[in-house]
Amino acid sequence: VGCFVGHYDLQQDPNAKPGVGFVIGTRKLQTYLPVFKSNTQYYVSVKSIFFDETIASFECKMYDSEENIAAEAILNAYRPTDIESFKRENL
């Protein structure tokens, strides 16, 4: 979500300070390992499947060091246009 917000904001204004984004949910979450071990490296791939100014959906996959898929999901993100207004109304 941080990459989504930062990339969008910098495309709009190269001098912009990146805004704030929120994960608003996941769909089709599937894990393929019984546990995720600490001190183990996992790798993530993300593909944008929908994007507009405030809402985005990403197809996300996580792999272990041997390139076996460990988990996958659709991640939904929200980027409020006015973070202060959003916080007053929702937090």
Image (cartoon, grey):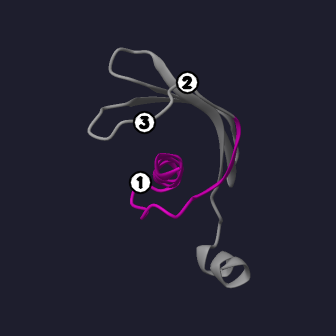
Give coordinates of residue 47: x percent, y percent: 57, 28
Q: In the rendered structure, find residue 43 and report the number of the disc placed on it.
A: none
**Range of the magenta residues?**
1-28
Q: Quadrant of residue 30?
A: top right
At 60% from the left and 80% from the top, the residue drawn is 84
Q: Which residue is mark 2?
A: 32
Q: Look at mark 1 in the image and give the residue it sits on.
A: 14
How far apart marks 3 and 1 lie (CA) works out to 38 Å
Badge 1, how many Cα within 10 Å: few under 14, some, many 20+? few
- Considering depth in this image, is 34 or 48 the residue closer to the camera? 34
Tell me whether the residue at label 3 lies in contact with that at label 2, contact meaning CB atoms closer than 8 angstroms: no
Please say whether residue 25 is one of the residues in the magenta stretch.
Answer: yes
Sequence-first tag of 1 and 2: 1
For label 3, the residue is 36
- Identify the residue at horizontal 29%, vertical 33% (top origin): 40
| Mark whose residue sits in front, 3 or 1 | 3
Which callout, 3 or 1, points at the residue further toward the start of the chain?
Answer: 1
Q: Hey, what amino acid is under mark 2?
A: Tyr
Q: Residue furthest bottom?
A: 88
Label 3 crowding class (10 Å Cα cut-off): few <14, some 14-19, many 20+? some
Q: Please tell me whether mark 3 sits on a helix, a strand or a loop.
A: loop
Q: Name the spot of residue 10 as percent of width and height, x first.
A: 45, 52
Q: Residue at x 53, y 47 (%)?
A: 4
58 with respect to 14 (left or right): right
Q: Secondary structure at mark 2?
A: loop
Q: Disc 1 or disc 2, which is closer to the eye?
A: 2
